[in-house]
Amino acid sequence: MRKNIVVGNWKMNLNRVEGIALVEDILSKLPNDNNTHIIFAPSFVYLNTVAELCAKNTKVVAAAQDCSANRKGAFTGEVSANMIASSNARYVILGHSERRVNFKESNELLKTKVGQAFDSNLKVIFCCGESLLQRESGLHFKWIKSSISESLFHLSSEEFKNIVIAYEPIWAIGTGKTATTEQAQEMHFFIRNLLFEKYGNKVALGTSILYGGSCNYENAKELFASQDIDGGLIGGSSLNSDDFIEITQSF
Ligand code: PEP
């Protein structure tokens, strides 16, 4: 049975004091019967502190927002997968559209990063999403297929157990414009079918596919009720404890 997951992607928000306060507030208010897997993705700078706070709750872990494509060496400013794992984070987000667009990350580079993450036993939250132009030109399915197949389809079924996919249409991220439940479900079904064609039923039904793009406490319930939407990757609404908790309880 696949997991229901909600990820808080803090991006370059919250300093150390603010980040710790947010995690402590959420952990103290989270219902005892919480069944959702919750992942906080703070800045690298205090990732270890957040990971240690998460250790108090078996359903909560930390993720990095990116990792280097290189194992180690003369790459000033970069953070390796091994460093992330040694900071007690369990996941790394790869391929967020802000990295694909602003830092020109290609499918090929992301394939390398996935390899680095797996070498350090990190699980990967792999993001993909089309631009508005691609959707309006009817190219969105083709784009998502190549994003996933070029970066992930070299993996074995066994390795795929450590992949979570996040579908995040770029036109919905931080814009307040959510994909309709029908648009999101349609793409999630398409992605699950891609996994089925490549790997068969076990991987297709076992992989959590999250939606991201202006998901908030008001629309999460309807989105998460869809057959193929297993949770969310949350940006803006992950910065407010009450909003975020409500999203985590929207299944
Ligand atoms: C994101 O950062 O991946 C995201 C979906 O942001 P927002 O929820 O703010 O649209």
Image (spheres, rainbow, N blue to C red):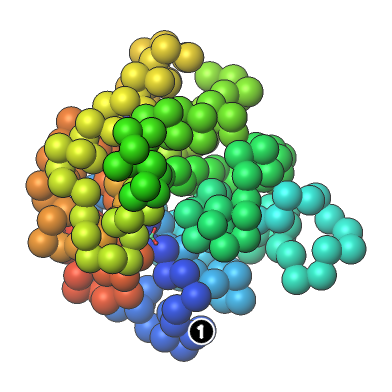
**110 up-or-down from 191: above or below:** below
**Where is mark 1, residue-wise?**
16
**Type of amino acid at the residue the image marks with label 1:** Arg
Q: Residue at left 34%, top 19%? A: 193
Please identify the quadrant where the N terminus is shown. Answer: top left
Q: Residue at x 26, y 61 (%)?
A: 214
Tell me the quarter of the picture where residue 227 sits: top left
Q: Is residue 61 left or right of residue 151?
A: left
Q: Is residue 19 left or right of residue 3?
A: right
Q: Residue shown at 45%/78% (left/top)?
A: 13
Q: Nearer the viewer, residue 34 or 73?
A: 73
Circle 1: element type: helix
- Tell me residue 53's x, y (percent): 46, 70
The part of the image, by quadrant, that contains residue 8 is bottom left
* Residue at left offset 20%, top offset 70%: 243
Q: Nearer the viewer, residue 18 or 70?
A: 70
Residue 105 at what x, y percent from top left?
Answer: 62, 51
Q: Is residue 123 above or below residue 43?
A: above
Q: Is mark 1 within 8 Å of ligand 1?
A: no
Relative to 87, 212 lies left or right: left
Residue lying at the far right of the rendered structure: 74
Q: Position of residue 7 (x, y in %)?
A: 37, 56
Q: Is residue 242 visible?
A: yes
Question: Looking at the image, in which quadrant does ligand 1 appear?
Answer: bottom left
Q: Is residue 38 visible?
A: no
